[in-house]
Amino acid sequence: MSSAARNSGPLGARLQGVQHFGLTVQNMERAYEFYTQVLGGTEVFRHGDFQGDPVHNTLLADQDIRANELHVDPQTIGVPNLRDGDQRLDVRFIQFDNVVVELLQYRNSDEPMGGPNSFAPPLANMSPAYPRMMHICFYLRDDVDFNKFIADLEAESARRGMDQVRANRTIRVRTDAERKAAPQSANTNKVTEAPSDGWELIYCKGPEGEQLEFVKALGPVKQRFANALAKRQQALAGAQ
């Protein structure tokens, strides 16, 4: 397909897929340690000290408009001043097998790169039920013992002082002590009802309080994803 034809074709045919997920963090070094040393991602590159009018406008123009509509100082709704350099943005890209995670930290200009202090406070509650809330989902290999993986993840994170890394359980618990005391078999939710039959999953909080999911896709649900991917690839090939 020519470039001209592609540029006038369906939007979906102009995409290559998802390039990365971005996660704004409070403590860059802590998040970096978790995604590289605990989960085994590989750093692609890092860049930082972003500031100036083009950067500010590219990332934050909508928030400036919102502050103007509310008749408030942008900083009162969490908008950093990258335009004048009062705040800066640093990023690090972490490669996993099939997607990249970008860590972002907005900091005051007098704070060092990679430090523990961010410009804005983290959200107090990170319930996945909130609209606009997102999560990052990691795909486990078929032969991995899911229950043991979650136990090892929590243990390794705790060893590094990352006590925020907490996975849910499939049984009802009322306190964190009860969660920790739950049997290891409660670490995995195995779905048996179609069309999700074959999913194994659990939700987990990461070191920044971010919402994570760990899954395996086996049997019927794995085949459904494979069929959908093949159908999409066939359709895209036919459009070329």
Image (cartoon, rainbow, N blue to C red):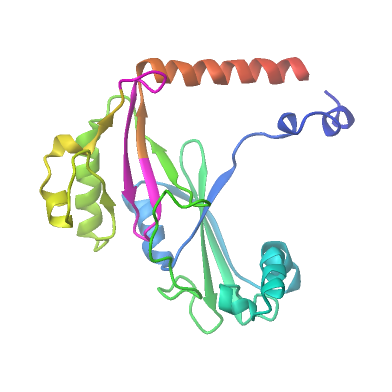
Quarter location, residue 2 = top right
* Residue located at (57% from left, 78% from top): 76
| Most distant residue in the right direction | 4
Image vertical order of residue 147 relative to residue 100, above or below: above
Residue 151 point in image, percent of width and height: 19, 44
Q: Does the magenta segment cover residue 211?
A: yes
Residue extending furthest bottom?
A: 110
Q: Is residue 34 left or right of residue 240?
A: left
Identity of the residue furthest to the front in this view:
70
> Residue 214: percent from the left, percent from the top?
35, 39
Question: Which quadrant holds the C terminus?
Answer: top right
Can residue 204 be found in the magenta stretch? yes
Image position of 198 with respect to 107: above or below: above
Instruction: Relative to 34, say whether 144 is above or below.
Output: above
Name the residue located 43 percent from the left edge and 68 percent from the top edge: 122
> Looking at the rendering, which quadrant does residue 32 occupy?
bottom left
42 lies left or right of 51 = left
Closest to the observer, 66 or 107: 66
Residue 171 is left or right of residue 115, and the answer is left
Question: In the rendered structure, which segment of residues is drawn in magenta?
Answer: 192-213
Q: Quadrant of the N terminus?
A: top right
Residue 4 position in % (x across, y down): 89, 31
Q: At 52% across and 84% down in the image, what residue appears?
A: 110
Residue at the (46%, 42%) spot, across then down = 96
Q: Position of residue 57 (x, y in %)?
A: 73, 67
Judge left or right: residue 104 versus residue 3: left
Rendered view: 90 above or below 154: below
Q: Nearer the viewer, residue 116 or 198?
A: 198
